[in-house]
Amino acid sequence: MGVPTPVAYKLRRGAAARLLARGMNYAVGGAGVLDTGFFQRNVSAQVDLFQAQHPAGNAANPCDVAVVVVSGNDYSFAADKDNSTSAAIAYIPTVVRRLREVLRRLRDDVGMRKVVVTNLHPMGCTPLFTRQLNYTGCDALANVGAAQHNAALQSVLANLDPTNATYLLLDVNAPFAAYVVGAATDRFPEPRRPCCESFDADGYCGQQDDDGKRMYTLCSDPTKHFYWDDVHPTQAAWAAVAESFRPKIQEFLST
């Protein structure tokens, strides 16, 4: 977005004023719109933290910009609980309803002038799914679920903000798909195979056995891989994706 890295919420007390002026990151790893089973603060609780820090923020005294990133932790939690992608898809209306309330709060209760919210990437093209296909293709059902979430979120924003003045639905699905759905490219010769790959189908990147032996392999060049591990893109992937949506963000923030 062209904005210097904001201060993490937990580091706020020791941060210099010039750093705090950049903004603050309230995000919590593994969190979702709803509770995802690991006791993280969900997105509603993150907004609570912001309001506690800025009690004066309201529609009459607007703040500047909020960025809300939802990457699918709610659906991973639902799928793991029932061992079913279909169960995750059935969860979409519940997730989107809560996300709608979060977005409304940011505008009406907190007083945010602009809110950027991401849609879902093609989840079926993450190595979590593509590994079962020897990294040759994507899971169609998981991608259908992502598309349904994105359509529901787009409808929510159209109702919340018919003039498109406050909310920007940032499309990360299309630039992700450009690299991971189709054939390999020179930029990412391994678009669906992770750089860090577990020996065990149920293992994870960074896993070690009882003797400290690595239970995973690492690629020689992460910049040639779109994904770092089962679900997280590499830094090179994010840089490539950002090229496509940076102009849209800058245009939205300038109006």
Image (spheres, grey):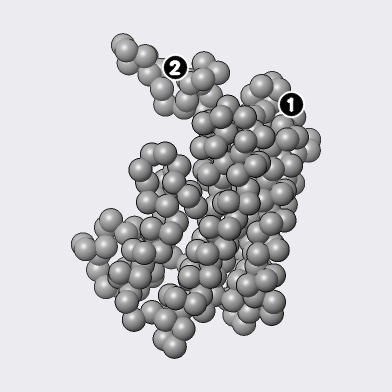
Residue 215: mark in rendering = 2
Q: How busy is the neighbourhood of tag 2: few (under 14 within 10 Å), some, or many (20 plus)?
A: some
**Quarter-of-image position of residue 237:** top right
Along the polypeptide, which appears first: circle 1 or circle 2?
A: 1
Numbered label tally: 2
Residue 219 x, y percent position in the rendering? 54, 27
Q: Which residue is mark 1?
A: 136
Residue 214 x, y percent position in the rendering? 41, 17
Q: Label 2 is placed on what type of residue?
A: Met
| Rendered residue at 50%/52% (across/down) | 33
The answer to which of 117 and 59 lies nearer the viewer is 59
**Quarter-of-image position of residue 130:** top right
| Rendered residue at 39%/59% (across/down) | 46
Can residue 213 be seen?
A: yes
Residue 228 x, y percent position in the rendering? 54, 35
| Rendered residue at 57%/51% (across/down) | 95
